[in-house]
Image (cartoon, rainbow, N blue to C red):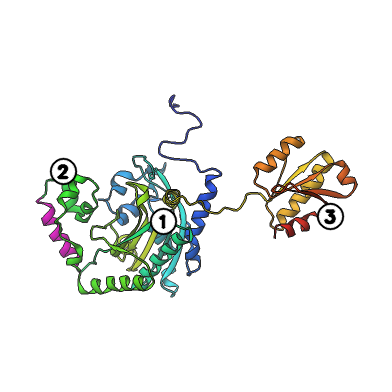
C-alpha cells in the first residue's frame, strides 16, 4: 500500500540524487582520488552491490555498529541472507580470493575500486544512508613501504584537488602477539568505569571499540585508559617506526593518535584516518589500515594486506569548506543552431562529425526559433555557436559565432568540423 505521506518523486529518507551540475564535481573528485592509484600499478575491480551477510559479520565484526545496527539485510525468495555492502574491503578481498589472484605469483595484488555503499544511520550533514567511496587494497604483502605508499597516494590525491586542511592521524593497533595483552589490560580498566549496559557488553566482545565512543560522558572516563603504544611488541614497534620514517622522509605530516581504532574489527598494526576540521562532527574524509587477519576470518589463507577508502561525498564537502571549485571542462564546446529543415540535416551531420573527432557538441532540438535556440547555446556553456539558414547553405557556408566575443564569420560547410577542431585546439 502506498504511503500517503511520501511523494512519488521523493528519494528515500537519508539519500540524495546526484544530478548536474553537482554531479560534475563528484566525477572530478572521484577521478582525482583514483588518478594516483592508476599510476602506481593498481588495477580496477568492481564487486556486487550486495554480498552474503556472513562476509561482513565475520570480517567487519559482529560487535561493530556497522554490522549490529547499520547494515541493510534482506532474504531472497530462496532463503539466502544478503546484505547491501556497508564497506568495500571485505568485498574486494572476497573477489580476489574467488579469482585466486593471490596465486598468480605477483604479490601484492594491487586493486582499486569506486562505488556506492549503504548504512542505516541517522541522516545529518555529511552522513547519508548511501555514500560514494574510492578505495584501494594491496593484498598479500607485509611491508611498511606498502602502508606508506598507500598513505602517500591518498595525500597526493588530496593535494591534486588543492586541499590544504586535511590532517593525517596515525596509530598502530598491534598484532596477534601483543594485542591480547593490551586487550586484557584495557578490559580490566573499562570494567571499573560507570558505563551503560550496552557498552559493558562491548567490553567483553571488543574493548577497543569503546575507545571509539564519541559520547563525552564516556570519553571523560577514558582519559587514563591504557594505551596500545605501551603494549606493542618489538616487531610492531619496529614496523610502525618504519611506516613513520617513510612518511616523514616523503614530507607527509601526521599526528600520532593513540585513541584511533576506527569502526571495523579487522584492522591490525597500521591504522590511519584523514580528517578535515571544516566538516564539524563528521570530520573524517577517509581512512584505512592494515588487516593481516581478514583473509583468514572469511575462510581464506593468510594474506597480510593494507588498504584505504576515501569518501567522495566528504571530499566534496571539504572542498566547499575551503572554497575550492574544481576546474571542470564545459559540457559543450559547440552548439548548433539550425534555421530550417535543410539546415537541421546539414548541422546534425556536422555535430555528429564533431563528436567523432572528440569535440563536445550539442544541437538545438525541438525546432526552436532563433532567439530561443541562441539562449540555449549560451546556457550550454559552449564556446562557439554554429548557425545556418537557407541562404548560408545556398552559399555552402555556416556561420561560426564566438559566444565570448560575439564575433561571427562564415566557414565552408565542408570545412566546419576541422575548422572548429582547430579553434578549440
Q: In the picture, which quadrant includes the N terminus?
A: top left
Q: State the residue in front, 206 or 40.
A: 40
Q: In the rendering, at what x and y percent does residue 384 appear?
A: 72, 49
Q: Is residue 33 left or right of residue 406?
A: left
Residue 371 x, y percent position in the rendering = 74, 35
Q: Are marks 2 and 3 in contact (CB under 8 Å)?
A: no
Quadrant of res 264: bottom left
Tell me which segment is drawn in magenta: 178-192
**Mark identifier at residue 310:** 1
* Residue 65 visible in the shown view: yes
Residue farthest along the left direction in this orientation: 192
- Check disc 2 and report the residue beneath it: 197
Residue 63: x %, y % from top left: 25, 50
Q: Crowdedness of circle 2 by 10 Å Cα count: few (<14), some, many (20+)?
A: few
Q: Earlier in the sequence, mark 1 or mark 3?
A: 1
Confirm or deny contact between disc 1 and disc 3 (CB under 8 A). no
From the viewer's perspective, is residue 372 above or below residue 136? Answer: above
At 40% from the left and 69% from the top, the residue drawn is 149
User: Residue 414, labelled with which disc?
Assistant: 3
Amino acid at each position: 500500500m502506498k504511503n500517503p505521506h511520501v511523494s512519488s518523486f521523493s528519494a528515500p529518507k537519508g539519500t540524495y540524487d546526484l544530478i548536474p551540475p553537482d554531479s560534475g564535481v563528484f566525477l572530478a573528485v572521484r577521478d582525482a582520488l583514483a588518478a594516483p592509484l592508476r599510476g602506481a600499478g593498481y588495477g580496477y575491480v568492481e564487486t556486487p552491490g550486495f554480498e552474503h551477510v556472513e562476509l561482513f559479520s565475520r570480517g567487519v565484526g559482529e560487535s561493530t555498529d556497522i554490522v549490529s545496527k547499520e547494515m541493510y539485510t534482506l532474504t531472497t525468495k530462496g532463503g539466502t541472507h544478503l546484505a547491501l555492502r556497508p564497506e568495500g574491503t571485505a568485498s574486494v578481498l572476497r573477489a580476489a580470493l574467488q579469482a585466486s589472484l593471490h596465486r598468480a605469483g605477483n604479490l601484492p595484488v594491487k586493486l582499486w575500486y569506486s562505488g556506492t555503499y549503504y548504512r542505516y544511520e541517522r541522516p545529518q550533514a555529511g552522513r547519508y544512508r548511501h555514500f560514494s567511496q574510492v578505495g584501494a587494497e594491496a593484498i598479500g604483502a607485509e611491508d611498511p613501504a606498502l602502508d606508506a605508499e598507500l598513505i602517500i597516494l591518498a595525500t597526493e590525491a588530496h593535494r591534486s584537488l588543492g586541499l590544504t586542511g586535511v590532517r593525517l592521524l596515525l596509530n598502530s593497533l598491534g598484532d596477534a602477539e601483543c594485542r591480547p595483552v593490551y586487550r586484557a589490560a584495557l578490559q580490566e580498566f573499562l570494567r571499573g568505569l560507570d558505563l551503560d549496559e550496552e557498552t559493558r557488553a562491548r567490553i567483553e566482545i571488543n574493548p577497543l571499540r569503546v575507545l571509539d565512543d564519541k559520547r563525552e560522558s564516556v570519553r571523560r572516563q577514558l582519559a587514563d585508559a591504557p594505551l596500545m603504544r605501551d603494549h606493542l611488541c618489538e616487531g610492531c614497534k619496529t614496523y610502525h617506526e618504519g611506516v613513520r620514517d617513510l612518511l616523514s622522509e616523503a614530507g607527509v605530516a601526521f599526528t600520532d593518535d593513540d585513541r584511533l581504532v576506527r569502526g571495523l574489527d579487522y584492522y591490525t598494526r597500521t591504522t590511519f584516518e584523514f580528517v578535515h576540521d571544516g566538516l564539524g562532527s563528521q570530520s573524517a574524509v577517509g581512512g584505512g589500515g592494515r588487516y593481516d587477519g581478514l583473509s583468514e576470518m572469511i575462510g581464506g589463507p593468510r594474506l597480510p594486506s593494507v588498504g584505504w577508502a576515501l569518501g567522495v561525498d566528504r571530499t566534496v564537502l571539504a572542498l566547499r569548506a575551503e572554497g575550492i571549485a574544481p576546474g571542470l571542462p564545459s559540457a559543450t564546446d559547440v552548439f548548433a543552431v539550425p534555421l530550417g529543415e535543410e539546415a537541421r540535416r546539414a548541422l546534425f551531420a556536422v555535430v555528429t562529425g564533431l563528436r567523432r573527432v572528440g569535440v563536445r557538441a550539442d544541437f538545438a532540438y525541438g525546432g526552436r526559433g532563433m532567439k530561443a535556440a541562441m539562449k540555449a547555446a549560451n546556457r550550454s556553456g559552449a564556446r562557439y555557436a554554429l548557425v545556418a539558414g537557407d541562404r548560408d547553405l545556398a552559399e555552402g557556408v555556416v556561420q561560426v559565432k564566438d559566444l565570448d566575443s560575439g564575433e561571427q564569420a562564415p566557414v565552408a560547410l565542408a570545412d566546419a568540423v576541422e575548422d572548429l577542431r582547430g579553434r578549440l585546439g
